[in-house]
Amino acid sequence: MKKQYFINANIVDPYNSINENGGLIVGENGKIEAIGKKVNTNNLPTREKPIDLKGKNIFPGLVDMRVFVGEPGYEYKENFRTLSNAALSGGVTSVVTMPNTDPVIDNVSIVDFLKRRGRDKSKINIFPCASLTQNIEGTNMTEFGLLANKGIIAFTDGVKTIQNTSLMSRIMNSAKDLGCLIMQHAEDYHLAKNGMINTGIIATKLGLSGIPDIAERIIIERDLALLEKIKCRYHISQLSSASAVEVIKDRKNEVKFTCGVSINNLSLNENDIGDFKTFLKLSPPLRKEEDREALVQGLKDKTIDVIVSDHKPEDEESKRLTFAQAATGASGIETLLSLSLELYHNGSVKLETIIQALTSNPAKILNINKGNLTIGNDADFCIVDLDKPWIVKKENLISKSKNTSIEDKKLQGKVTNTFVKGQELFKI
């Protein structure tokens, strides 16, 4: 690989406290050799012809902590090749994949298969999760130690929640002993049973059963109470309500934990569902505008640590059904950054805070050396035109499934190039 020189870029790297105009040098080995304002035409070899980015932004490659991939079992919805191509178009260079595949990622033999497939088919960094319980049934724990030794980065039951408090206590104790990360989808099953959207006027109007925000809050408060006694690595995957944000604010100084939010819940509310738009049937559900505003404020004041895409590809046949029968989830990895930048353009959240929640914060939680532009590290980064306008059209999406929740939405800010280990793998 030839050495690459980039100049005249606005570089935002929260991990290294860089927010300045400068340049980037990528070595022949795909590592970062130099970065910042010292990299300019005055300091480069005269024989080299640098790439002038003309004020575009350089961000570290995004780290998406919640991505569903179809392999194994659901390759017709997404596979490692289509996932990595979709991720690259959105500036995402590292993903954490969920375990609810077929078969479930709950034993070492399936992990070996997953790692081989990821290595052979993916262009991005794949960090697999395993399930907390065998077959995601919520009864028997998986072998945390064996799975962690095989490279499993975290444990979660995906869109299911550990309902049994005694089991959750045992899980936390094992996680504490082994240093494993637990990621919980917070939702009380009995309160949320058969629910499809947020409990309230919209649910009543549409005649759909609702999911109350107390279902989220109860699990969070239970787990944080356990966490006071059992201090393990614990992460709440996605907050969706103002009441949950209140709990987090009250407890963050008392108990050590982290939390995330889906870009869907930051950008949309229950009114967007309109007349049964099944592409907006999500988990957790879209809630009231007051909830969305509380989540944005939580991100702004850093109560919330991470933004995720919650990329859940579903084929059209699974979505073109009645609301009750339609599959839950939306494709979102390609639009994660651009939709997040909406919060910057409308003045809600600082750019550096948004990039931190998409890069260095998730990497820190996961204990991986990604999401930063430190000298000597792999040159995983994206080049972004912050002001470039574009419209989300499902036919232009790269993901195998086109179930976007923001069809026809006008966005500002587009990834123009994405690099992994110094190699340009996406370019408009």
Image (tube, helix red, strand yellow):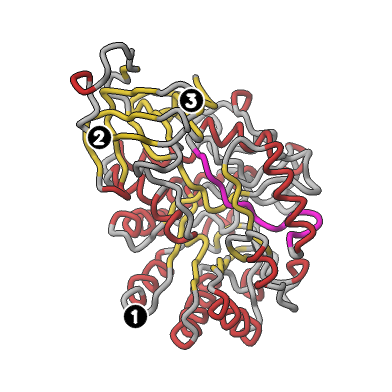
Q: Position of residue 420 (x, y in %)?
A: 51, 34
Towards the viewer: 5 or 213: 5
Q: Give the range drawn in magenta.
A: 92-105
Residue 254, numbered label: 1
Task: Give the CA separation, mark 3 to mark 1.
Answer: 44 Å
Which of the marked residues, 3 or 1, is nearer the chain's N terminus?
1
Mark 3: which amino acid? Ile
Report the residue marked by disc 3. 391
Residue name at image x 51 percent, y 81 percent: 222
Circle 2 is placed at which residue position? 36
Image: 57 above or below 179: above
What's the residue at 39%, 42% (across, down)? 376
Residue found at x 49% / y 19%: 428
Disc 1 to disc 2: CB gap under 8 Å = no
315 displayed left or right of 277: right
- Say which amino acid is labelled 2: Gly
Left or right: 104, with 129 as reference point: right
Displayed quadrant of residue 186: bottom right
Could you say which quadrant of the image residue 20 lies in? Answer: top left
Residue 412 makes an appearance in the image: no
Q: What element carries label 3?
A: strand
Measured Cα–Cα span from mark 3 to mark 2: 32 Å
Question: Toward the viewer: 299 or 26?
Answer: 26
Tell me the SS state at disc 1: loop
Q: Where is residue 416 in the image (x, y as percent from the top left)?
A: 44, 24
Q: Per the image, is 246 magenta?
A: no
